[in-house]
Image (tube, helix red, strand yellow):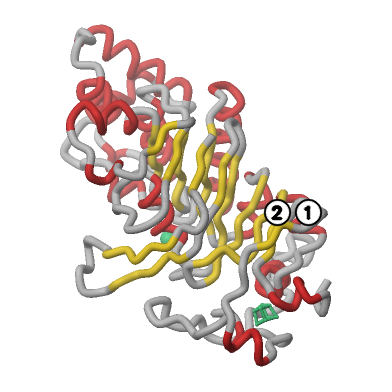
Amino acid sequence: YFDVSKPWLNRVLERSEKLSLKAVDGVSFAIRRGETMALVGESGCGKSTVARLVVGLYGLTRGTLTFDGEDISDLAGRTGRQAAAVRKRFQMIFQDPYASLNPLWRVGTIIGEPLRFFRPEMSGAARRQRVGELLEQVGMSPMDANRYPHEFSGGQRQRISIARALANEPEFMICDEPTSALDVSVQAQILNLMRDLQDEYGLTYLFISHDMAVVKHMADRIAVMYLGRIAEIAPADQLFATPHHPYSKMLLAAVPSLEGGGKERSVIQGEVPNPVHPPPGCAFHPRCPHANERCKAEVPALIARVDGSEVACHGVEEGRIE
Ligand code: SF4
Ligand code: MG
């Protein structure tokens, strides 16, 4: 359904910080219609960069992007109708609903904006009707259309962002840390809402998070990223039960256990190196207890295993690591 071809080698210029080059290298995955694919990893691993490449906010320098059979590698450079035809099928939900809602606009104007843009033929009355329906779909009242973003809590503002994202009946949603700015109790409500909406509308999610507990709740499949590369891809249940890559094991060991009162069982070892100048060979080798000379020299390829996972690790490939 959604394919990032291999090998996918990119040097991405972050538009906001023109001086810092961020690299995403050799990232390759496919997302199936109706599933939730999670991208996980520590901050700076390139998750958000991948999300922005996928929606065309950043351009590809090499490799291809395919959406529903169509090559959209040139999406970032498209304009007008050509861009709109693809973009209206995608939506992005960001971490910070405070920053992504225009504080000067009423909620009805905010949610109706994509309708004005993509469906200019729609009458004002029809649009107001649709905005009311969208507010109800996210558990709010049609009356809320007349209020302003600052009148709502963080969770309600994220509901408003979701309503706006749903306005054009998108197929594919990229959710970048959608609940990490919210209280834990509110997080669960928003995640459940997103799951319900997925079932109802057959949405496909690319779900980006650093929080393994959140990912466990949402994902069908998980891609673990480390310094701009994919370390391991596996079905979610399987990754939690039998992670292969040493970095996946480290991430999972650091997941707070809910039974243990949320206390961390173990802490991730070592610093994350600078993603612009990653270590040679396997970028994880300075932190890996299994590193050998080959690991320091040779970048491990992502290799499919019989159990359905894909792992980029020499130790796993050589049978030194389970
Ligand atoms: Fe560790 Fe080597 Fe595997 Fe990298 S390739 S994770 S250094 S064993
Ligand atoms: Mg991020």
Tell me the tag on residue 153.
Answer: none
At x 26%, y 33%, the residue is 83
Q: At label 2, which amino acid type do we have?
A: Ala
* Disc ID at residue 234: 2
Determine whether the residue tagged by mark 2 lies in a helix, strand or loop: strand
Q: Are marks 1 and 2 in contact (CB under 8 Å)?
A: yes
| Numbered label tally | 2
The location of residue 224, given as percent across then percent down, is 60, 62
Residue 148 falls in image quadrant:
top left
Looking at the image, residue 128 sits to the left or right of residue 213; the answer is left
Badge 1 crowding class, 10 Å Cα cut-off, few under 14, some 14 to 19, many 20 or more, is: some
Q: Which residue appears at 35% of the width and 44% of the height? A: 73
| Image quarter (top left, top right, bottom left or bottom right) of the N terminus | top right
Residue at the image point whose x is 67% and y is 43% from the top: 220
Q: Quadrant of residue 12?
A: bottom left
Q: Secondary structure at mark 1?
A: helix
- In percent of the image, x 43 and y 62: which residue is there? 9
Please name whichever residue, 147 or 163, is drawn nearer the observer in this view of the structure. Answer: 163
Alpha-carbon distance for marks 1 and 2? 6 Å
Residue on which the image places disc 1 = 238
Q: Quadrant of the C terminus?
A: bottom right
Residue 127 seen: yes
Instruction: Give the x, y percent position of residue 265.
Output: 74, 75
Up-down relation of residue 241 to residue 276 (above or below): above
